[in-house]
């Protein structure tokens, strides 16, 4: 599925959307809650639009959780230490190549309760009306890189991730093919999924809502 929905330049959003979809379908109560939110905010007589994305807070939490648990790359791009420095008790000599483990940050048990479980609720702040952010300034995980040389298109990547995931959830009823399981896909401790995600998709909206192509 990933190869079919991604192309050069959108690997990170496509990766997050695929992992989120797999995790959501594997937990029917999460799937129902996400779809119910989309139906409440958008309805079934039109497709999700960009203006809707800030109101889909639970879907945003699902996408953020996918970025945390399933980063697109194991490590961040390397940096070089410009001087001798000590970080959290570790001495890093000048000239050292330093890499941040995306996988290690997002699955750090000191930062996350039950880090290997897909729990979107952990990102919801019931006391705030602000949309859930898909980036993490506190460096507890990395979605679109970080720092002065972080991804310049993080906002665009956020919108692409949300649009892709929201329309996949809104437009189709998803199910696991008979005789197959998502466990092998989801229990991988690597950054990349193997075997590929295979799901059945059936339309859940009126026919006139779907774009027609000639």
Image (cartoon, rainbow, N blue to C red):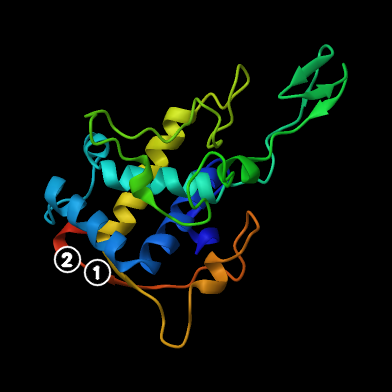
Q: Position of residue 88 (x, y in %)?
A: 71, 24
Q: Residue at x 56, y 35 (%)?
A: 142
Residue that badge 2 annotates: 207
Q: Are marks 1 and 2 in contact (CB under 8 Å)?
A: yes
Horizontal side of 49 relative to 190 (left or right) equals left
10 vs 212, nearest the viewer: 10
Assign a secondary structure to mark 2: helix
Quarter of the image that includes the C terminus:
bottom left
User: In the rendered picture of this protein, how many numbered marks are placed on residues?
Assistant: 2
Q: Position of residue 10 (x, y in %)?
A: 52, 43
Q: 11 or 92: nearer the eye?
A: 92
Horizontal relation, residue 163 to residue 148: left or right? left
Q: Residues within 10 Å of mark 1 (few under 14, many from 20)?
A: few
Read off the residue under disc 1: 203
Residue positioned 40% across, 77% down in the render: 176
Residue 125 point in image, percent of width and height: 29, 35
When asked about the image quadrant of residue 21, the answer is bottom left
User: Residue placed farthest to the bottom in the image?
Assistant: 179
Q: Secondary structure at mark 1?
A: strand
């Amino acid at each position: 599925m990933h190869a079919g929905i991604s192309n050069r330049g959108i690997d990170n959003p496509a990766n997050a959307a695929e992992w989120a979809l797999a995790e959501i379908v594997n937990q029917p109560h999460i799937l129902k809650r996400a779809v119910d939110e989309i139906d409440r905010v958008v309805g079934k007589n039109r497709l999700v639009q960009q203006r809707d994305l800030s109101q889909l807070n639970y879907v945003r939490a699902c996408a953020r959780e996918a970025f945390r648990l399933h980063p697109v790359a194991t490590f961040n791009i390397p940096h070089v230490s410009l001087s001798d420095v000590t970080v959290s008790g570790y001495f890093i000599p000048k000239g050292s190549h330093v890499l941040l483990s995306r996988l290690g940050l997002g699955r750090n048990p000191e930062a996350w309760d039950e880090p290997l479980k897909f729990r979107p609720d952990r990102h919801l702040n019931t006391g705030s009306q602000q949309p859930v952010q898909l980036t993490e300034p506190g460096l507890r995980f990395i979605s679109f890189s970080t720092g002065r040389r972080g991804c310049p298109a993080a906002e665009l990547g956020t919108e692409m991730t949300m649009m892709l995931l929201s329309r996949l959830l809104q437009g189709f009823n998803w199910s696991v093919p008979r005789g197959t399981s998502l466990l092998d896909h989801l229990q991988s401790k690597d950054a990349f999924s193997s075997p590929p995600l295979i799901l059945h998709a059936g339309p859940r909206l009126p026919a006139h809502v779907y774009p027609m192509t000639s």
